[in-house]
C-alpha cells in the first residue's frame, strides 16, 4: 500500500500537522481480541456533560494509587459485539470525517492497563460508525445500517418498541459492497495512552441506539504498510446519552433520518451500566449543539487477553471471558 504512512512515535505524540488527510489503508492482519474497557471521571468545562453515578465510579481495586482521577483504575467494561460492518483495512488517520455532513465531534480516548493503571503507548485504536442518516461506509450498495429516509422527520422522543436489527444484521461479518471508507480510521496512542479522532456525531438506524464502534490492538508493529501483528485486547462500543441525541435530531442532516430511533434504554447491545459499558462523557453548548461536541472516555483494558468481538454484549450479557450471548448479535 504505497500511500500509507506510519504514525509518528515521538515522545510528544502526533501533532495536527502530522495527520494525513488521505492516509493509506491498514494492512490486513490477524485480529484476536480481548479484555474490557473501563472509565474514569473526566473534568468537564463545558455547559453540559454526561456524569457517572457513584456506583459507576467504584474502583476495581484499592491498590490504585493514581494522583489524578483520569488515571484511576476501574473494573473492565463489558466486551461488546463487533457487528457486521467492521473492515480490517481502515485508513491510518485521525480525521475520519471526509465529506460527511453533521455536528463536529472530537473523540478523546485514553487506553490504560486496568491492572497497573499504566497507559498503553503505540496501541492501534480503530473507530467506525454510521453517518447522520444511518449508513456505514463500504456498505451503501446494500443499505448497510438503515433504509433511506422517507416521510416526515421523527419526533424528539421515540415511541414504540423497536424490533429486529439493521439490514444484513447479525453478529457475522458482512463483506463490503463498495470502496468508500468515510467515518472509519485507525491511529496510535501517544506515550500517555491518548488518542484523538475528529469525526461527526453519528446518526441511527433500525434497532440500534446512537453508537461508535471501537477496537484496541496491542503487541503489534507499526510499519510502512500500517499496523501488523499483535492482537486485539478490546472490542467495544461507545454510547451517547439521550439528551445529546434528542438535541442533535432536530438539526440537519439528522432530522432527515426518519428511521424509528431506538433509545439507550431500549438498545439490545448497550449493557445499561453507564460509563463502564461505554457511555461517553460529553461536553457541548446545550443551546447550540451544532457548534460541536467533545466526547471522552478512558478504556481500561486487559492487554494480555483476547476476544474476537463475535460474542458478549447486551444487558445480562457475559463478561470478558464468558461465552457469547446469541441475542446480542447486531452491529
Image: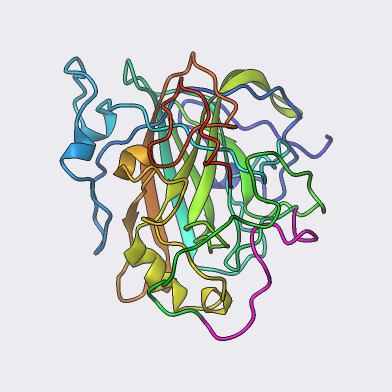
Magenta residues, as a range? Answer: 139-153
For the N terminus, the quadrant is: top right
Residue 292 drawn above or below residue 172: below
Rendering coords of residue 314 (x, y %): 44, 41
Residue 35 drawn above or below residue 263: above
Residue 325 placement, left or right of 20: left
The type of colouring in the image is rainbow
Q: Quadrant of residue 99?
A: bottom right
Q: Based on the picture, tell me whether residue 194 belongs to the magenta stretch.
A: no
Residue 60 placement, left or right of 307: left
Residue at the spot 53% in from the left edge and 25% down from the top edge: 122
Q: Nearer the viewer, residue 4 or 331?
A: 331
Residue at the spot 18% in from the left edge and 19% down from the top edge: 65
Q: Main secondary structure of the magenta part?
A: loop
Rendering coords of residue 190 (x, y %): 47, 30
Q: Based on the picture, tell me whether residue 140 belongs to the magenta stretch.
A: yes
Q: Quadrant of residue 82?
A: top right
Residue 313 placement, left or right of 173: left
Amino acid at each position: 500500500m504505497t500511500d500509507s504512512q506510519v504514525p509518528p512515535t515521538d515522545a510528544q505524540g502526533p501533532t495536527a500537522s502530522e495527520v494525513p488527510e488521505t492516509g493509506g489503508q491498514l494492512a490486513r492482519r490477524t485480529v484476536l481480541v480481548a479484555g474490557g474497557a473501563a472509565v474514569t471521571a473526566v473534568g468537564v468545562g463545558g455547559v453540559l456533560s454526561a456524569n457517572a453515578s457513584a456506583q459507576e465510579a467504584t474502583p476495581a481495586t484499592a491498590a490504585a494509587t493514581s494522583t489524578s482521577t483520569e488515571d484511576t483504575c476501574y473494573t473492565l467494561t463489558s466486551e461488546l459485539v463487533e457487528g457486521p460492518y467492521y473492515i480490517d483495512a481502515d485508513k491510518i488517520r485521525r480525521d475520519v470525517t471526509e465529506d460527511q455532513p453533521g455536528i463536529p465531534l472530537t473523540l478523546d480516548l485514553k487506553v490504560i492497563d486496568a491492572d497497573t493503571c499504566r497507559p498503553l503507548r503505540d496501541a492501534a485504536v480503530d473507530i467506525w460508525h454510521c453517518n447522520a442518516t444511518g449508513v456505514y461506509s463500504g456498505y451503501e450498495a446494500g443499505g448497510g445500517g438503515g433504509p433511506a429516509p422517507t416521510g416526515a422527520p421523527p419526533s424528539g422522543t421515540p415511541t414504540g418498541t423497536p424490533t429486529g436489527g439493521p439490514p444484513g444484521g447479525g453478529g457475522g461479518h458482512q463483506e463490503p459492497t463498495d470502496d468508500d471508507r468515510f467515518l472509519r480510521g485507525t491511529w496510535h496512542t501517544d506515550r500517555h495512552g491518548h488518542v484523538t479522532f475528529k469525526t461527526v456525531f453519528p446518526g441511527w438506524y433500525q434497532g440500534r441506539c446512537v453508537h461508535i464502534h471501537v477496537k484496541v490492538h496491542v503487541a503489534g508493529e507499526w510499519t510502512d504498510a500500517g499496523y501488523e501483528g499483535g492482537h486485539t485486547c478490546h472490542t467495544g462500543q461507545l454510547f451517547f446519552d439521550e439528551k445529546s441525541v434528542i438535541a442533535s435530531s432536530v438539526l440537519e442532516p439528522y432530522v432527515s433520518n426518519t428511521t424509528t430511533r431506538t433509545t439507550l434504554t431500549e438498545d439490545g447491545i448497550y449493557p445499561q451500566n453507564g460509563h463502564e459499558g461505554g457511555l461517553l462523557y460529553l461536553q457541548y453548548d446545550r443551546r447550540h449543539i451544532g457548534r460541536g461536541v467533545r466526547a471522552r472516555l478512558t478504556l481500561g483494558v486487559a492487554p494480555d487477553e483476547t476476544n474476537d468481538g463475535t460474542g458478549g454484549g447486551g444487558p445480562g450479557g457475559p463478561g470478558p471471558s464468558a461465552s457469547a450471548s446469541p441475542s446480542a448479535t447486531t452491529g
